[in-house]
Image: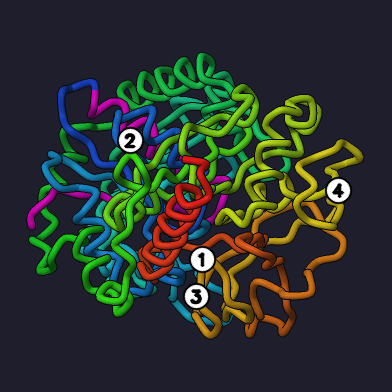
Amino acid sequence: MNIPRLVIAAPSSGSGKTTVATGLMAAFSERGLAVSPHKAGPDYIDPGYHALATGRPGRNLDAFMCGPELVAPLFAHGAAGCDLAVVEGVMGLYDGAAGRGELASTAQVAKLLRAPVVLVVDASSQSRSVAALVHGFASFDPQVRLGGVILNKVGSDRHEAMLREALEEAGMPVLGVLRRAPQVAAPSRHLGLVPVAERRADAVSSVAALADQVRAGCDLEALLALARTAPPLACEAWSPEAAISASPAFEARDPGRSPGGRPVIAVAGGAAFTFSYAEHAELLTAAGAEVVTFDPLRDEGLPADTSGLVIGGGFPEVYAPELSANEPLRRAVADFAAAGGPVAAECAGLLYLARSLDGKPMCGVLDADARMSERLTLGYREAVAVSDSALAATGTRLRGHEFHRTVIEPGSGAAPAWGFTRPERRVEGFVQQGVHASYLHTHWAAEPSVALRFTGAAAAAAKAAVVAGHP
């Protein structure tokens, strides 16, 4: 597979990676190129802006959660048929999972993709020192190919001249210069940028402004030429169908179907539930489900014939009054769970299933209460399923991440969902009847049996409904 590609990295967070990556995606898309957007690491929010810029799903490449061996195949799956792929890095170029060396770093992703790296440097408080900084990043790992620099937050023509002179001495091409432009910055809050779904019209304007800024300040022809120097990737593209059929659980699956054919799995969406990896819906579909999206802020009932429910991450704390006010849907979710319907809830979904969130009534499926906290919980986790559930058999091992500024009390039920083995030992989450609810975000491409098991539980629930006379 030979897809021209670039990795957009930086010395540290806050340097302007998202600005440059999103602007490049939009600018190249406007030129008629099919651009494949990717994000290194687990972040859900940036891919929403990438999708807006390109018209294609933003996809994550996370070597911790999925394993290094899946990075290139997942990239190839997302980039198939495209003219160019742009990968936005995570944190600083060489920052990865704590205490794990290069694992899950942008540098590791770049090496696995054999992709040239463009370093975005916040030049606002330096001049000639920029050459020393860039030299250090270029020489730290000889296997990382640093192809050029984009200077961000440059103050004046004179400032730009000094920076260019220093980098010319260091032999590093300057591929773009962006001046300070706070008017195109996307708004942020407690977990980062505000998701696209919450500010659609403003987000469209922001992405258009980023494209204008990048088009004016960057050498798009030089960047495209650099992308075309990436050699072919010697790997098979990941396929949800192949991943499902290769799962050891595939042969033992229940081939049952809902009354309409495939079991209907309802996936929460809308502004309050924006966190989802594109591969999850693809795996559910490959496992035999019909995936239907619903919006807990607007819809007063679950989709027709729902026999499985997935409630992923997002910002329910921002929309707690509106979610609470939708009493018909809260009641429908509670009734579905009480009847034993399979429910997979991650983070925001966990809060929605609780008895209350910041004092506002939620679905009451779990005998627990959630609230905002001053403390940010953030980091990778290694987990093992400690209770049999519709999502995972006891002993199933997955890697995931936590990312929240809320707490739920108690933190686990009589049958916890996960036991964490690193970085600390504790149990977390709830398993009761068909419900699996936890703070842990996981990437199902790492363990396709999860999607297969959940779809099987949905098919069984659909069959049981027919037998009971409730199709």
Q: In the rendering, which numbered label is found on residue 176?
A: 2
Distance, label 3 to label 1, CA atoms, is 12 Å
- Can see residue 133? no
Foreground pick, 109 / 224: 109
Q: What is the x, y in percent for residue 376?
A: 76, 56
The residue where tag 1 is placed is 391
Q: Earlier in the sequence, mark 2 or mark 4?
A: 2
Q: What is the crowding at mark 1: few (fewer than 14 residues within 10 Å), some, or many (at least 20)?
A: many
Residue at the location (51% across, 66% down)?
A: 391
Q: Residue flagged by tag 1: what amino acid is it?
A: Leu
Distance, label 2 to label 4, CA atoms, is 44 Å
Foreground pick, 425 / 161: 425
Distance, label 4 to label 1, CA atoms, is 26 Å
The region drawn magenta spans: 1-29
- Magenta segment includes 292: no
Q: In the rendering, which numbered label is found on residue 371?
A: 4
Q: Residue flagged by tag 2: what amino acid is it?
A: Gly
The residue where tag 3 is placed is 398
Distance, label 1 to label 2, CA atoms, is 47 Å
Q: What is the crowding at mark 4: few (fewer than 14 residues within 10 Å), some, or many (at least 20)?
A: some
- Magenta segment includes 22: yes
Asked if labels 1 and 3 touch by Cβ distance under 8 angstroms, the answer is: no
Residue at the location (25% across, 54% down)?
A: 147
Q: Secondary structure at mark 2?
A: strand
Asked if residue 301 lies left or right of residue 405, the reply is left
Which one is in front in this view, the residue at disc 2 or the one at disc 4? Answer: 4
